[in-house]
Image (tube, helix red, strand yellow):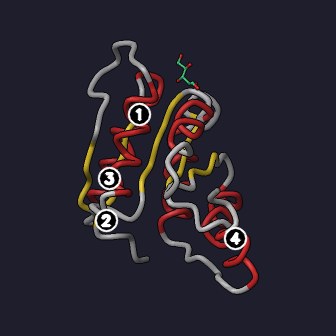
Amino acid sequence: MIFPDKIAIGSDHAGFEYKEAIKLYLKRNNTIITDVGTHGLDSCDYPDYAHAVAANIENGAVSFGILICGTANGVAIAANKHAAIRAAICWKKEIAELSRMHNDANILCIPARFVTVDEALELVQAFLTTDFEGGRHTNRVQKITI
Ligand code: RB5
């Protein structure tokens, strides 16, 4: 299984413990991680971390990001304000795979309050090891940015 060399990751307080588990998992797979925070369980604002992960993709530091909050809605809404970002909320392995195959998603958004840590790791593996299919999906993806 080939993981990307490097990724950016961020969460709010609701996703903090999941972020730490995902970091351990990815480090075991030799992925270099840029952790934009949060760094503890104190209540904080999810857009701060969504914008920071998006910026790491926009400036070319990484090609993929992972964001976690309670529902995944907040981080996805914030990250998708960036033109270069396609942030996908995923709660099943198949949805994570399809977000790469059909949507060329570049940020995986995980709803920590609705999946287990093991399910989150399965989402990460599916997302980071699945390629964009191209073909008929290329034109559709190009039409997303306005
Ligand atoms: C935090 O309580 C929660 O609102 C946040 O993690 C997220 O679910 C927002 O969309």
User: What amino acid is at disc 4?
Assistant: His
Cα distance, mark 3 to mark 1?
Answer: 14 Å
User: What amino acid is at disc 3?
Assistant: Asn
Q: Looking at this rendering, what residue extends furthest in the front direction?
A: 146
**Which of the two marks, 4 or 3, is nearer to us in this view?**
3
Q: Secondary structure at mark 1?
A: strand
Q: How far from the left and from the top, in percent, is residue 24? A: 30, 49
Return the residue at label 1.
11
Judged left or right of residue 117, residue 65 is left
Judged left or right of residue 131, residue 49 is left
Which residue occupies the foreground of this view, 57 or 1? 57
Return the residue at label 4.
102
Which residue occupies the foreground of this view, 127 or 104? 104
Cα distance, mark 2 to mark 1?
Answer: 21 Å
Q: Secondary structure at mark 2?
A: loop
Label count reads: 4
Location of residue 33 with respect to 138 vertically, above or below: above
Name which of mark 2 and mark 1 comes first in the sequence: 1
- Residue 45, quarter of the rendered image: top left
Cα distance, mark 4 to mark 3?
Answer: 23 Å
Q: Are marks 2 and 3 in contact (CB under 8 Å)?
A: no
Residue 59 is marked as: none
Name which of mark 3 and mark 1 comes first in the sequence: 1
Q: Looking at this rendering, what residue extends furthest in the top direction?
A: 43
Cα distance, mark 4 to mark 2?
Answer: 25 Å
Location of residue 116 with respect to 7 vertically, above or below: above
